[in-house]
Amino acid sequence: MSDTSSSSPAPHGDHAPAHEESHDPTHFHFHKRLYLGVFGALMIGTLITVAVSYFHFGAADSEVGNITVGLIIAAAKAALVILFFMHMKEERSMIYKFMVPTFFFLLVLFGLCVFAINDHIHF
Amino acid sequence: MEIPYTVKPRPDTGLWNAKIGIWLFLASEVMLFGGLFSGYIFLRLGAAPGWWPHGLLNVPVGTLNTIILILSSVAVVFAWAALKMRQFGRYRVYMALTILCGVIFLGIKLGYEWPAKFHHFGAYIKDDSLHKYEQYLGNEHLAEVGIGRRIEITGVFPTKEDEEAYKNPEIKEFRLKLDAINADPTNEENDRPRFMPRPMSDKIATIAKEDVQYASFFVPRHNSYFAVYYLITGLHGLHVIGGLLVFGYFMLPVSTRLYEKDPEHLANRVEVAGLFWHFVDLVWIFAFPIFYLL
């Protein structure tokens, strides 16, 4: 993390009590407030997702507006989980080398769905 | 034989091996769930008017499960951090909390949500017969307010005898105790989604079999929505079970011994299992709105 200077040290954690501290050579910084902040943001995101589903966005006979809003909020929550809980923000480039193409192919997979528009399934 | 690079980074990748391994696995998982979510979008975009159901799942329960799963994600981060700080007692508390959250999630999903659906029944009415059931469908009202028409009547069998009678192919009609939406279809409360589900009515409808296009309990074959709902939440549930087994292993004496030998090795194991767990949480973050809300 680059912003360690701005976050004040947690009451306990950053400097663990001596009796449990052993031969750890890496100076581990536990960004407790950051994780709790992300947790709070995810909770608020969940409540917003539920709340906005009771409003209608876009044309009256279309669900596209609501689906767009719902997925944008879900994507924002997903980004928080990936960047902070999964440490993607401070991950090595090796992981990006295969996760970025994966994400690209995921979008391709979703893109295929345009073929379903105006081609209704009949039973 | 010592397994190499469990703690020290491998010079060419710059990472310890399990970290690379889990991310490669997650890449394949992204494509697995990506294909299923893509199938969901495909079926939904292609569904004929009236065939994509809304508001059949219990939103408060789904919201609760979302909160429980996010809570368990935070707990596993705290468990990992506790190991990094060499606080083994605290690690075990957070790990136990993670497992508890996962078990509650599964309990709600498999013990309550799924079984409730297996007793719920829906009958799609033939186009030519829709007018006969106008009092349950309210399509005139829906046309007025500009909402797509309703073609399905849902509810439960009022008695065990009704359920048994339905199995007889000879019967001409069957009775259904109606959901609020069909008991009172012109009520504007139905026109927008609700947080709290409306209680089931006492009203009983008699439906002629010849008017029914297709009817079944809310099992996977009932419609595309339930097929993809059970598939994605079922596969997600299997992932929750898998994660819980690994976390259970971390609570066993064998993991305590690993901690005593090399605490960093156990911390890395927890980190890798945590990455998997966050992915399971991610899948739910998308599954919750698309099945419960949209």
Image (spheres, coloured by chain):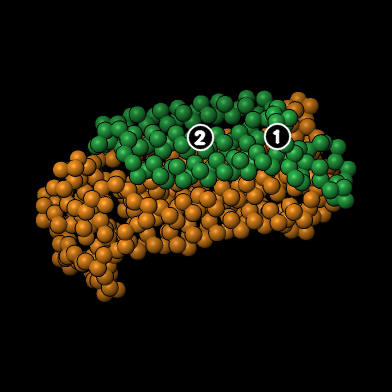
Chain colours: A green, B orange
Q: Which residue is mark 2?
A: A76
Residue B123 in sight: no
Report the residue at 55% width, 25% height from top. A101
Q: Nearer the viewer, residue B31 or B83?
A: B83
Comparing A47 with B49, the one in front is A47
Q: Are dots 1 and 2 on a single chain?
A: yes
Q: Is residue B34 left or right of residue B228?
A: right
Residue A73 is left or right of residue A10, and the answer is left
- Find disc 1 in the rendering and name its residue: A7
- Nearest the eye: B101 or A46: A46
Image point 78% across, 32% down: which residue?
B9
Residue B81 visible at all: yes
Gap between marks 1 and 2 measured at Cα: 23 Å
Secondary structure of the residue carrying numbered label 2: helix
Q: Residue A71: x, y in percent? A: 43, 36
Disc 1 marks a residue whose amino acid type is Ser
A109 with respect to A43 (left or right): left
Residue placed at 55% from the left, 50% from the top? B69
Q: Quadrant of the C terminus of chain A?
A: top left
Question: Which chain contains the residue that carries disc 1?
Answer: A
Q: Chain of mark 2?
A: A
The amino acid on which the numbered mark 2 sits, given as a three-letter code, is Ala
